[in-house]
Image (spheres, helix red, strand yellow):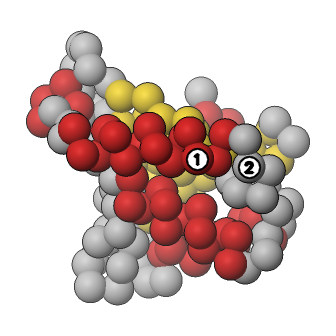
């Protein structure tokens, strides 16, 4: 079980091992977190990755226009820039809300490493000021 340095252990270290795509299902997420993540990868001179995000609680709590516009802006800005990681973002807006938090890393299209726990894809959740946990789980099951 991981309880500290989550941003590095979950969002950065797998890239050093050759992971090239991160699929995230998170109850809540913000464009500021995605922006920080993309900039952090670039600042470390790592290869750009693909980030596929599903925000699961929109049908329950909604999503502010500000956050939606932020996600759209990030996707547009990085779409034609080969130096930055690419973000795609989807919202669960019908059916039961999804409160899960799952982070699945892929290498060359194959699930490689996965984590699940309490941390939403937000900056507070990945800061040292919050107590969150994430643990390794089966990457193939998590991807399915």
Q: Is residue 113 above or below residue 99?
A: below
Farthest residue, direction left: 61
The foreground one among 62 and 18 is 62
The foreground one among 83 and 9 is 83
- On-image quarter of the C terminus: top right
Q: Residue at x 24, y 46 (%)?
A: 66
Q: Which residue is mark 2?
A: 81
Q: Is residue 87 above or below residue 41?
A: above
Residue 135 spot, x, y in % from top left: 49, 63
Quarter of the rendering containing residue 106: top right
Circle 2 sits in a helix, a strand or a loop, which is it? loop
| Cα distance in 3D space between marks 2 and 1 | 7 Å
Residue 23 spot, x, y in % from top left: 59, 42
Q: Residue at x 61, y 34 (%)?
A: 143
- Residue 77: image tag: 1
Q: Are marks 2 and 1 in contact (CB under 8 Å)?
A: yes
Taking the image as drawn, is residue 61 in sight? yes
In the picture, measured across the screen, residue 36 lies left or right of residue 117, that is right
In the picture, measured across the screen, residue 116 lies left or right of residue 17, that is left
């Amino acid at each position: 079980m991981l309880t500290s340095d989550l941003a590095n252990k979950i969002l950065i270290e797998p890239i050093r091992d050759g992971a090239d795509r991160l699929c995230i299902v998170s109850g809540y997420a913000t464009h500021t977190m995605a922006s920080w993540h993309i900039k952090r990868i670039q600042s470390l001179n790592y290869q750009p990755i693909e980030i596929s995000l599903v925000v699961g609680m929109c049908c329950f709590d909604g999503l502010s226009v500000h956050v939606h516009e932020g996600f759209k802006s990030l996707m547009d800005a990085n779409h034609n820039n080969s130096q930055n990681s690419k973000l795609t973002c989807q919202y669960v807006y019908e059916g039961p809300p999804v409160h899960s938090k799952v982070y699945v890393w892929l290498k060359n299209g194959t699930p490689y490493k996965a984590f699940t726990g309490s941390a939403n894809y937000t900056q507070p959740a990945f800061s040292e000021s919050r107590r969150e946990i994430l643990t390794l789980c089966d990457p193939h099951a998590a991807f399915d």
